[in-house]
Image: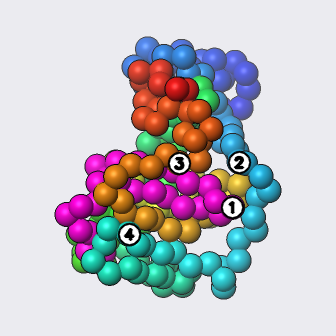
Amino acid sequence: MLTSRDDRRELETEMRKAGRLPPGQSATLKFPVLHYGSVPSFAPQAWTFRIWGEVEQPKSWTWTEFQELPRTKVTLDLHCVTRWSKFDTLWEGVALKSIVNAGFIDLKPSARYVMQHCENGFTVNIPIEVALADNFLLAIQFDEAPIEPGHGYLRGLEFMASDRLGFWEQAGYHNEADVWKEQRTV
């Protein structure tokens, strides 16, 4: 387990040599919480997950129902536009692609973008291709443990015909935010 400043620097050097550290990024051993406002508590009995917008029929699941959807695990590098990268992160959750392919959701041909809706009005916009990629999960676990409230609890996906800016993009962050191209702010 890497824990010291020297471990972090060694990891950063290794990842840079392997081509896994984008320009301008620093490796982190922690999992930073970048949250706006208070962190809401998680109440499974009151939690629901909705899908609406450019879909043939809106859909909603309770926490118990959501837990029964098919799950998958992915390991990936996590890069934040605020200049940190965390490597080999292990996630478990529901792959949006799998529930679309299984017929749980029927997208309209006009669906081109997805707005992720979270607590307190926080939103994230992405192209449909990103949302339907193999590594896009509606994550419920990180590193074999439930996700902590500071890191999430997505509440819904709105499928859209045209793009709208998400929370951070409205605050001046780049709409594409490709860290490999150093797209950080507008």
The residue that mark 4 highlights is 53
Q: Which residues are magenta?
A: 105-129
The residue sitting at 61% across, 30% down in the picture is 82
The residue that mark 3 highlights is 166
Examine the rendering and report whether any part of residue 84 can be seen. no
Q: Earlier in the sequence, mark 1 or mark 3?
A: 1
Q: Which quadrant of the figure has residue 6?
A: top right
The residue sitting at 71% across, 48% down in the picture is 35
The residue that mark 2 highlights is 35
Q: Earlier in the sequence, mark 3 or mark 4?
A: 4
> Callout 2: few (<14), some (14-19), or many (20+) C-alpha neighbours within 10 Å?
few
Left/right of residue 128 with respect to residue 5 in the rendered view: left
Q: Earlier in the sequence, mark 4 or mark 1?
A: 4
The residue that mark 1 highlights is 120
Cα distance in 3D space between marks 3 and 2: 14 Å
Amino acid type, label 4: Gly
Frontmost of labels 4 and 2 is 4
